[in-house]
Amino acid sequence: MNRIFSGVQPTGDLHLGNYLGAIRNWVRLQDDYECLFCVVDMHAITAWQEPEMLRASTREVTAALLASGIDPKKNIVFNQSQAPGHAELAWIFNCVARMGWLNRMTQFKEKAGKQKENASIGLFAYPCLMAADILLYKATHVPVGEDQKQHLELTRDIAQKFNNDFKKDVFPVVSPLIFGAGTRVMSLRDGTKKMSKSDPSDLSRINMTDDAAAITKKIRKAKSDSDILPKSQDDFEGRPEAANLMNIFAALSDTDIEEVCQQYGAEQFSTLKKELADLAVAKLSPIQDEMRRLMADTEYVDSVLSQGAERARVMAEPVLDEVRKTIGFLKSRA
């Protein structure tokens, strides 16, 4: 069976974009792939994290995965820092990757901005850690959004260079899994920008912890234009807010976007917003209720992560042994 690795950072509140773009798709992959779902707390510390908040966020993200339908018995669910092989392999990949490759990573430029000289080495090199996350388990597929395709290409480059350098096929060349509607959910305040937990406006996103009243309010206040809704996605050009709301409706209802256009085309935004709010509340409320129950049971959440990490370590150790032998490290006698 093909193997999937995917991760989510425990920083800030999870939002609708995380759910539609990643978590919901992971749930649907469980029966067809061997899956590892990782809360990547080592990636999170490329920016400063308050320790207690990091612990709380790690548990909250885990609760969201479980509440959404991820089965920790069928899959490996763990947090990255409990599997030290990620750090070991990342260092080896730091010695395989080239500076020029990392300099081309657009996400580093976006996150560091004008403070490039003050950015951490971790932020610059974290694509090597991402490659280690995936290749430590010899994953064959990775679900990615458009903004992560470049990093997956780097993972492929690192795997190929390692294999070529040592003339041995140690690592697979990983394939991306890119999904349809909902893979890129945009801001409710600006349809040209991706929905993000870093946006200063809470009205820009629907958080997975928002109650029904908050969800309804945010959708009602979502930016719109003065025209009627388009009758086809061919008419989305220049109308990012209409495209975003209709795409969200399509994703939540598991409907093709053209069907949404046929249903709501020529209607006012207010009609779509009302029905979208009702749909979002109906879809998210059961998940949110289960999230709250799990977040109150930290002992259970911690046990899921601990057991998952143990399974991950067992899976990773033969790969690490193969890598150590390949590059010439002495075998430990301990």
Image: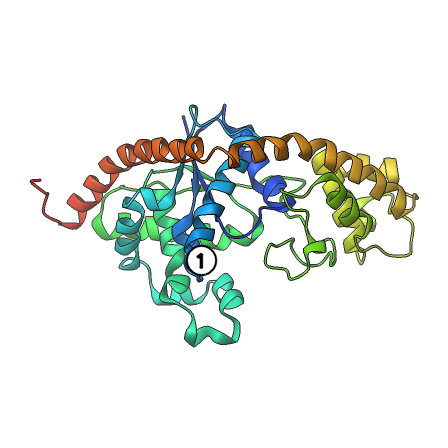
x, y percent for residue 8: 49, 45
Residue at point 51%, 63% (across, down): 106
Residue at point 80%, 56% (across, down): 223
x, y percent for residue 62: 48, 38
Hey, which residue is sitting farthest left in the picture?
A: 333
Q: Amino acid at mark 1?
A: Glu
Q: Secondary structure at mark 1?
A: loop
Q: Reply above or below: 40 against 275.
A: below
- Nearer to us in this view, 60 or 144: 60
Q: Could you tell me which quadrant the C terminus lies in? A: top left
Residue at point 32%, 42% (across, down): 82
Residue at point 56%, 31% (across, down): 293
Q: Is residue 186 left or right of residue 311?
A: right
Q: Could you tell me which quadrant the N terminus lies in? A: top left
x, y percent for residue 7: 46, 43
Badge 1: residue crowd in 10 Å (few <14, some 14–19, many ≥20): few
Residue 210 placement: quadrant:
top right
Coloring scheme used? rainbow
Hey, which residue is sitting farthest front in the picture?
A: 296
Q: Is residue 270 left or right of residue 170?
A: right
- Nearer to us in this view, 302 or 314: 302
Residue 2 placement: quadrant:
top left
- Nearer to us in this view, 11 or 138: 11
x, y percent for residue 109: 50, 68
**Any part of residue 255 in sight:** no
**Any part of residue 329 in sight:** yes
| Residue hosting label 1 | 50
Q: Is residue 89 left or right of residue 298?
A: left
